[in-house]
Image: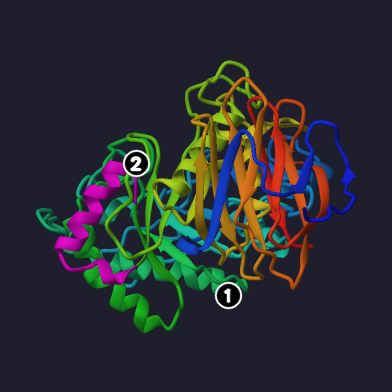
Amino acid sequence: MIARTAFTLLCSISSVAAFSPTQHGTTITINTKKTYQQFDGMGFCEAFQRGTQIYGADGLSSANTERVLDLLLSNTTGAGMTILRNGIGSSLTNPYDLMKSIETVTPASPNATPNYDWQGTTKPGFGLDNGQLQLTKDAIARGVRTIYSDAWSAPGFMKNNSNDSNGGYLCGVSGIECSSGDWRQAYADYLLQYFKYYEAEGVAIDYVGFLNEPDLNVTYASMLSSGQQAADFLEVFSPTLEASGLKTKIACCDGSGWEEERSRLEGIQQAGAESTLGIVTAHGYSSPLSTPFSTSKPVWQTEWADLDGPQTYAWYYNGSTGEGLTWANHIQQAFAVSNVSAFLSWIGAGNTTSNSALVLLDGDEVNVSKRLWAYAQWGRTVSPGAVRVDAHVRSSANVTTTAFQNKDGSVAVQVINNSGREQQVTISGLQTHRWSSDLVKSYLTNNDHDFDLTAQHQWSRGSNIQSHIPPLSMITFTTGS
């Protein structure tokens, strides 16, 4: 039998031990030689002026601004988010819940010189672009690695309905002829100018989306598009972006659901335009995430939340749509079944009566939902650039898992116990990324714990890891320092 090293038990809830071959309960076998998709990160959005709420628009104090930023971004006290999704405005004005366009004067024609205006919200402390620019700078300072800017619509004068809301199509794509002409190049130039404003502020935009939920006609900023019509714009946008010298890559198309996006991707593929994309993006609303897309491009789930349920802070109460355990399962299945490379929440923090924000703000009150700590189980333990590795569960339908190997060789294994009983779990197949031993840590989330370190010990090469997972709980095991 391999000698065991004494370990420090930080919480009585969970114990971890290295032990030899006798195994009971559920066995999880890790195979780091069998790899899947790259992990790009966890993220959130503060579009439609939600960023101004973080900076005090509704009474949040400076101290709580810092607290909220840390909750979302810190890798030691928060969720460790590394992707920020911003909204590119299209509205002529910017009362609350609208995103102002950088071009509010309608040009005489698509070829006329545009009249750009980089103002956004100018109230002191909010910064430009409806609070998003300041948030972007603060997020980068706290470790955000990737900026994704997405346009919900082109400005109204570029569309066949002359409105940035209520659907409508970009003038010039297949089947859409406008008396004003073809606005595809003007829209490409518009997006490029937005990037240049950010570049002048010292911020590089990594990915750009030109559509958001193009399958929906809604009363807020929106623009309809089929896959073929998206390809028609890519025909113009891709060379324009390439000629600019910017390193920004194109994302498409943020379908409102998994199958809605699959349809648009297939249309882009049939048109021969898939090579112009950097990533494929989809939401989880209209249809849930399911079988992977047939593409060599990384796939991101870029927006999903509980939009209809009441405000819920619990990890588990009755299995409702807004609980933390529900979202832990959504995230895990997205990685394990749908092969996504990133998973983003709709709103990180905001003042809302719905359940859509991870951190709910009310004046200067900060209410943290357990959904945030579901995101932390991956955001805090898996680094961008890691790869998902094979993790096979034997003997329990109630225990599910994912596993990732970071670039430094360390491994994170996320284990969810969906049953009402404690589960004994054995993790086998792990190898140390040092010569002989590793420090193994376990982090617990349930109704009584957020992302709490429960145990750590020295683990010897070739031994297994055993733990008792509390009912309706999640633990991530990490190897490394």
Task: Name which quarter of the figure residue 256 lies in.
Answer: top left
Q: Mark 1 points at which residue?
A: 200
Residue under the image location 77 percent in, 50 percent down = 441
Magenta span contains residue 263:
yes
What's drawn in magenta, residue-wise?
A: 254-277
**Nearer to the camera, 474 or 298:** 474
In this rendering, which labeled residue sits more in front, label 2 or label 1?
Answer: 2
Looking at this rendering, what residue extends furthest in the top direction? Answer: 318
**Nearer to the camera, 270 or 330:** 330
Q: Mark 2 points at which residue?
A: 290
Task: Name which quarter of the figure residue 371 lies in.
Answer: top right
Percent across and percent down for residue 428 are 62, 51
160 up-or-down from 420: above or below? below
Residue 458 visible, this orientation:
yes
Neighbor class of circle 1 (other Cα within 10 Å; few <14, some 14-19, many 20+) is: few
C-alpha gap between disc 2 and disc 1: 41 Å
